[in-house]
Image: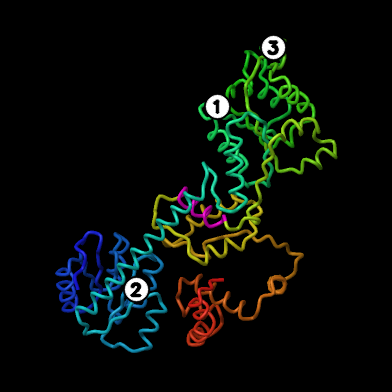
Amino acid sequence: MTARQDPVSRSILVVDDDPSILDMTEDLLTEAGFEVTKSASGEEALALADEREFDVVLSDLQMPGIDGLDLLARMRERRPDTPVILMTAFGTIQTAVSAMRGGALDFVTKPFQAEELLVSLERAFERRALEEENRRLRRAVARSSSFGELVGKSPAMNEIYAMIKKIATNRSNILITGESGTGKEVVARTIHFTGARANRPFVPINCTAMPEGLLESELFGHVRGAFTGAHTNKKGLFETAEGGTLFLDEIGDMPLSLQGKLLRVLQDREVRPVGGTQSVKIDVRIIAATNQDMNQAIEEGRFRQDLYFRLNVIPIRIPPLRERSEDIPVLAESFLRKHSDDERIRLSDAALRKMMRAPWPGNARELENCIERALALASSSEISASDILIPDDVTPNDGTLQEILLRMALDQRLTVRDLTDAYIDAALEATHGRKSEAARILGMNRRTLYRREERHVEPRKRAGNFG
């Protein structure tokens, strides 16, 4: 068998405490075109793996100190994308099963034939190439599932994309509604930068961020002497946004006294500075946003109905994340790339499942914070479920943790097998596949864990059901 002649991208770390085996393996692999680095111990191998990345690790199983299984477990933590092949002169079915369950890609028995080892290595390189391609595809999916700064592939988001394309070029006022953290300002920015006003200013202001008097001055401007401290004339944000877009965030919280003045500006298309006598014509598109129920605000007298009609020419509702959970993976991938330049960083399947099940009351903003926190907590290039910290929204009055979990299980009609599978999965994920530690958490011995894993988890994985 002939290896591809690309030694720079096909590097192998060979680990064995027997110098003769190391030299023989190095000669064989170098002749086949691989770049080989030798290590005489598990400790040295880990140090080398910390310094640089290898495409494959080929390690002896039985070594003093850190043996092959320990090295495998630690490599899974530090370099989860690096395939590990274990070799031993004392091969048994039990050790092979332990190695494969620990995450080894393959297991070869010494003395091995050159062809056998090269076939195993070729399989390892194919596996690594496939994982790299999967990462590339995930990034491509994230890009293709986006529109401007918006990210998502759900039917609801596709409808928003289609709406933006229709309305971006006209000047009609827009009212964006949605819970906090859903991305209302991102939608507003996307509308602005997609349309004919893209080269003109986009000016945002939060209507709750300042006192009423200051908000009036910020919006409409003022003339010198209009009030104490007004030493010079000042343009308001309407004039600053001339030719562009003014984004009025949290419009539902605007004081009633200012709502009437805003209505007049929208009707007349001109603005008069505070204390001034002359009005200034303006050409500004208004995009407003709120997380409030505007009909309720109108009924309670907190918001003018006539202003609502002026603003709500084109309504856009952004659904909360819990209504479009299919967007969570692409959003998470997008936030991962935003906060990390390391393309090896990835989310484990268990981490994604955990995020998909979460309610996300803070929506995309909360998800982004969660990803940023996970990047800081992760001990390897793979973010595990234990790195995903989701605030507990259960209050003490809801009962004990056991009662809460039982209620949730009954509400979702989970079977005993479902619960067993999920608990075993969670323990293995939390311990990065270390069976002894997982068994201790589960309150069972390691052999029992193996049997239960074979009976519950493994058949489910082979069937392609990951929860």
Residue 371: x and y in percent read 52, 54
Q: Which mark is residue 201?
A: 1
Which one is in front, 405 or 148?
Answer: 148
Q: Residues within 10 Å of mark 1 (few under 14, many from 20)?
A: some
The quadrant of the image that shows the N terminus is bottom left
Which residue does the image show at 42% across and 62% down from the upper left? 380
Residue 196 appears left or right of 109: right
Name the residue carrying label 3. 225
Kindly report the distance in space between the C-alpha atoms of the residues bearing marks 3 and 1.
28 Å
Residue 418, quarter of picture: bottom right
Start-end of magenta stretch: 327-339
| Vertical order, 220 against 456 (above or below) | above
Kindly report the distance in space between the C-alpha atoms of the residues bearing marks 2 and 3.
76 Å
SS state under label 3: loop
Q: Which mark is residue 71?
A: 2
**Tag 1: amino acid:** Pro
The quadrant of the image that shows the C terminus is bottom right
Residue 29: x and y in percent read 18, 71
Secondary structure mostly seen in the magenta stretch: helix
